[in-house]
Amino acid sequence: MGNSKVNMDSIPEDMWEKIDNKEKESDLISRPSLTYFQDAWRRLRKNIMSMIGLVIIIILILTAMFGPLFSKYNFSDQSLKMASLPPRLELFKIDNENYIYLANGLKIYSSTSNGEIINLLNPVKQDFQKKFKVYELNGREIVLDFSDKPFKLLNKNDNEYPFYKKVWNKNHLLGTDDLGRDLLIRIIYGARISLLIAFVATLVNFFIGVLYGGISGYAGGRVDNIMMRIVDIISTVPLMLYVILLMVVLKPGLKPIIIALGSVFWVRMARLVRGQILSLKEQEFVMAAKTIGATNLRILVRHLLPNAMGPIIVSMTMMIPTAIFTEAFLSFIGLGVPAPLASWGTLCNNALGGYRSYPYQLFLPSLAICITMLAFNFLGDGLRDALDPRLRK
């Protein structure tokens, strides 16, 4: 068996190569240091539904802020001639240049081929016993026979005008309400009012709940016991009943709704903050702050509340859709913002009387409420998971 030892001197120098430090570090398993909120944002981005909800919320806020700038209508502009026009129009062809739309209420509008309403036609002759109306459009006679359904549009030779096609309403993309007001701009203004009430009421609940719950949890003992018994007494009566009673006493408007929502919904936030403070106030960093002479207010504001901010943010996010729904419900039962202001609840209330004939007037604001509440709920669920330190990897 040959000698297994290698003579190092016999190896040429050009076969040796210096190892770079980068190659040594390439085998190390590490990641860049992230702060608590940076790591939460990283995990939130991986939640598809939460990001969809966040995008919807951003679009909704931007539309509510800047949407009216691009519309030629105001939320209070009325045109009774254009009342209750739907988003989709069924056009009938009179000739190559003239088209008409037959609306509910036996009204006929002249229109272009792409769905732009020109004018409301007035009948030149009508007979309600024989159930017909006669119109004239650019020298052509149009007879509306409503003796039997479906109604017929006839020429003077009793030949029926053919159905042309269904097109989008170019004048009012989402149609109009019973007073001829543009429904799209009213939904946008409704988003502005509903979101404003929800955000302000949530901030009021945040400040009251955090202050009340923080003091109760940090003080402990008899103070905590008395403060929590007050919360228990308030919670015995349904919070919605409190809100309705306050709205009955106060005059309808934005401020009364914010006061009503902000004065009762803070109890949940107070309980949450109290629980977080109770679990944190015995930690080592609190003991260290007390050792160096920090005041109780500084310990509460600078140390305890920032460490409890994760669950608080989640609770605030989930509180916003609750406030939106409560405001919509109050407006729906007539305790919301006064006319001609529009919130989503008032739009639903106004559409309730004619929902069988004009279902879009009720469906569209209801859809806006549903989409907004789902978006905030998706975002809240994602924040709850992202801000949970136990799920950090």
Image (spheres, helix red, strand yellow):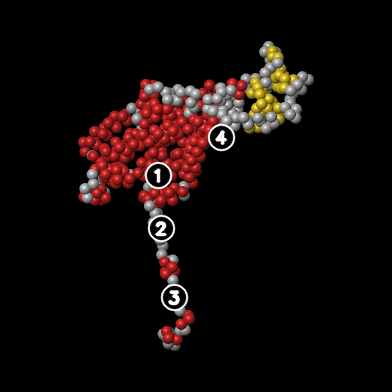
Q: Position of residue 139 (x, y in %)?
A: 75, 21
Residue 319 visible in rendering: yes
Viewer-side label of 4, 1? 4
Q: Nearer the viewer, mark 3 or mark 1?
A: 3
Residue 225 in picture, x, y percent from top left: 24, 35
Chain-order first, disc 1 or disc 2 = 2
The image quarter containing residue 197 is top left
Q: Indicate which disc, 4 or 1, sits on the residue closer to the N terminus.
A: 4
Quadrant hosting residue 32? bottom left
Q: Which residue is mark 4?
A: 70
Q: Earlier in the sequence, mark 4 or mark 3?
A: 3
Q: CA distance from mark 2 to mark 3?
A: 28 Å
Q: Are marks 4 and 1 in contact (CB under 8 Å)?
A: no
**Three-letter code for the amino acid on which mark 3 is drawn:** Lys
Q: Residues within 10 Å of mark 2 (few under 14, many from 20)?
A: few
Q: Count residues near mark 4 (Cα–Cα under 10 Å), then give few for <14, some for 14-19, many for 20+.
A: few
User: What label does residue 94 carry, if any?
Assistant: none
Residue at the spot of label 3: 18
Q: CA distance from mark 1 to mark 2?
A: 23 Å
- Helix, strand or loop status at disc 1: helix
Point 49% across, 36% down: residue: 65
Which residue bears the numbered disc 1? Answer: 384
In primary-sequence order, the first of circles 3 and 1 is: 3
Question: Mark 4 to mark 3: distance in Å?
Answer: 67 Å
- Identified at 44% across, 73% down, the residue is 19
Quadrant of the image containing the C terminus: bottom left
N-terminal label among 2 and 3: 3
First along the sequence among labels 2 and 4: 2
Q: Is residue 225 left or right of residue 388?
A: left
Q: Which residue is mark 2?
A: 32
Residue at the location (34% across, 36% down)? Answer: 207
From mark 2 to mark 4, how far is it between C-alphas? 45 Å
